[in-house]
Amino acid sequence: MIELEGLTKRFGSKVAVDHLSFQVRPGIVTGFLGPNGAGKSTTMRMMLDLDNPTSGTVRIDGKHYRDLQEPLKYIGALLDAKAMHGGRSAYNNLLCLAQSNRIPSSRVDEVLDMVGLSAVAKKKSKGFSLGMGQRLGIASALLGDPEILMFDEPVNGLDPEGIHWIRNLMKALASEGRTIFVSSHLMSEMALTADHLIVIGQGKLLADTSMADFIHENSRSYTRLRSPQYERLRDVLHQEGFTAVETAGGVLEIDGATTEELGELAARHQVVLHELSSQRASLEEAFMQMTAGSVEYHAHSERDPAAEPPAVGAGWGENWNKPGSNNTEGK
Amino acid sequence: MTSPATPQDRRQEPEAGLLSFYASPIPIRPATLGDAIASEWTKLRSVRATVWTLGVMVALMLTVGVCTALLLAANDTDLVGEPALVLGFFGVLLGSLCVITLGVLTIGSEYSTGMIRTTLTACPSRVRVLAAKAIVFFSLTFVITTVTATVVAVLQTLILSGAATPSGGEWALSTVGVGFYIAGLGLLSLGIGAIVRHSAGAITIMIGVVLLPLVLALFMFADDLRSVQRFLIEYSIPNQLSALYGTTMTNSGPSGWEPLLVMLGLVTVALGGAVALLNRRDV
Ligand SMILES: Nc1ncnc2c1ncn2[C@@H]1O[C@H](COP(=O)(O)OP(=O)(O)OP(=O)(O)O)[C@@H](O)[C@H]1O
Ligand SMILES: [Mg+2]
């Protein structure tokens, strides 16, 4: 269990983390989301007592991090995969950590085996690929067999097999009753792994809800219709009082109607349908919708001059109800 | 899991209301400075920099020490009543640059690689981390410098058998005393490394600390700067080091074991400052 209370961090005049209060509960995977620069990594560094909060506190099982006797046995963290000495072998990098927390050296072999690095245990870690470095970082987090695990963008640089492995690992660790706190920008991945979500934007808490509620509250569901009698279908819908959004390729999107209603409607008016499907928004869409107002670093697309730095309610989230954004992945 | 856990070893019950469901079978006992020392020893012995810097230092001390002795013996030079031990000075002065480098790298490489974050996550007590590093580094450099200095001194005395016979005190100063002084200089470098967090910067500062006082003194011709010049020369690190060999550039200034006290003071200030900064700063 991790508890944050009014956690605030200022870098000069910049408020990186702004009065964050939330709890990370055991037994589930809690996803930590936010656009670039939202303050996720800063928050995690403060949890580990690496950065001093400007104000507010973090408690790990009721204690301050500095008061933990052998912290690796309480909390394992992967902040930055390259936070190892490249001139040292993978084994020795882990061994010196183990020794400082009285973890038996046999455990080093165990975790190296767990992350699949046994074969390169004696190799210098600077020669490691991005994914191998990530695995070494994960091994260091697992070293003390801790009850709390914290990962900052763990799937960065992992191959599909590695991503799959991480997903299952986190689920397995959570099912053992551990507290898992993980940040990621891969929404489809997060949708598959996390049970609970903490979303921040510009350092402020935007949401602290379950995954299902988050998607439900922050995105729309609609029904997709395609018909060779496009004009007729549109008129029929209009007559019956449905608002249809026309999108590319002769597709109509209808909010607030069930597939049953629309199917029966089409049958009554003898309109041929080529597609009738219910679309549920993905976590990605929900996330972009929610954080649209707090995105700090925008990419500027040359092909789309409309995507200028927007006010609240726009940003990359504006794609959300634009043509062609009917993303059906996720739950 | 490997370690057999007894129930008493299990973690303390968390405070009421904060139940954690997962209990690791790896027992928790408070880690001590000893564990941190074991960890730092692993770090020091598992990087190439240690072997390189200390290897170069030993090589420099041996070759420079033996070569000067052989040269003097070949030319039948008179050491004007000084024991042969004084010849060790040049090798040690050069070797001190290696110790400075290693001292800075001991902490500087943690910052350059980002390892410091991992280190402090594993051991949040900044004092303990720094103390462990200092103890391990000091012990290693002290032993190596003392042993090498002793070997060189013995060889020089054998080669120049005609020179004055050194007293017991002179032997002690030019072996153990030099060992302490050089290891102390290394600790000072470690402290500076922790303060500036940048290896190249800290090494440059330390080389400046060693050389600058003498260089500055060279340019102080004015009469009213005489006393400053004298102070700079007497308290320059090369002069204090040569004081351990019983020879100095001036006739006043630190002598005997006094240079060690001066170094102790410098080390205390540097490490104290480093601990204060580490406690306050973000990593
Ligand atoms: N040491 C620092 N000094 C000054 N500003 C900093 C420092 N660390 C972070 N910041 C600022 O704080 C803000 C939050 O940064 P942080 O790295 O926590 O974001 P993040 O949510 O992890 O972003 P990303 O998704 O890109 O990893 C950023 O605007 C960053 O510029
Ligand atoms: Mg980050």
Image (spheres, helix red, strand yellow):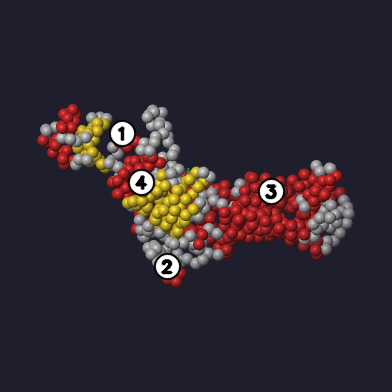
What chain letter is assigned to the residue under label 3? B
Q: What residue is rendered at 70% in x and 54% in y?
A: B185
Q: Chain of mark 4?
A: A
Local SS, label 4: helix
**Camera-nearest label, 2 or 3:** 2
Q: Residue at x 49, y 67 (%)?
A: B29
The residue carrying pointer 3 sits among few (fewer than 14), some (14 to 19) or many (20 or more) residues within 10 Å by Cα, namely: many
> Looking at the picture, do discs 4 and 1 lie on one chain?
yes
Q: Are marks 4 and 3 on the same chain?
A: no
The disc label shown at residue A322, or none: 1
**Where is residue A123 shown, x and y percent of the image?**
52, 50
Taking the image as shown, residue B197 lies to the left or right of residue A177, namely right
Q: CA distance from mark 1 to mark 3?
A: 62 Å
Position above or below: A220 against B227:
above
Q: Which mark is residue B13?
A: 2
* Labels 2 and 3 positioned on one and the same chain: yes
Q: CA distance from mark 1 to mark 2?
A: 54 Å
Location of mark 3 (residue): B206
Q: CA distance from mark 4 to mark 3?
A: 50 Å
Mark 2–mark 4 Cα distance, whole angstroms, equals: 35 Å
For label 1, the crowd category at 10 Å Cα-Cα, with few meaning under 14, some 14 to 19 and many 20 or more, is few
Q: Position of residue A86 (x, y in %)?
A: 54, 48
> Crowding at label 4, few (<14), some or many (≥20) Cα neighbours within 10 Å?
some
Hey, what amino acid is under mark 3? Met
Could you confirm whether marks 2 and 4 are on the same chain? no
The answer to whether dots 1 and 2 both sit on one chain is no
Which quadrant would residue A234 be assigned to in this image?
A: top left
Say which quarter of the image contains residue B145: bottom right
Quadrant containing the N terminus of chain B in the rendered view? bottom left
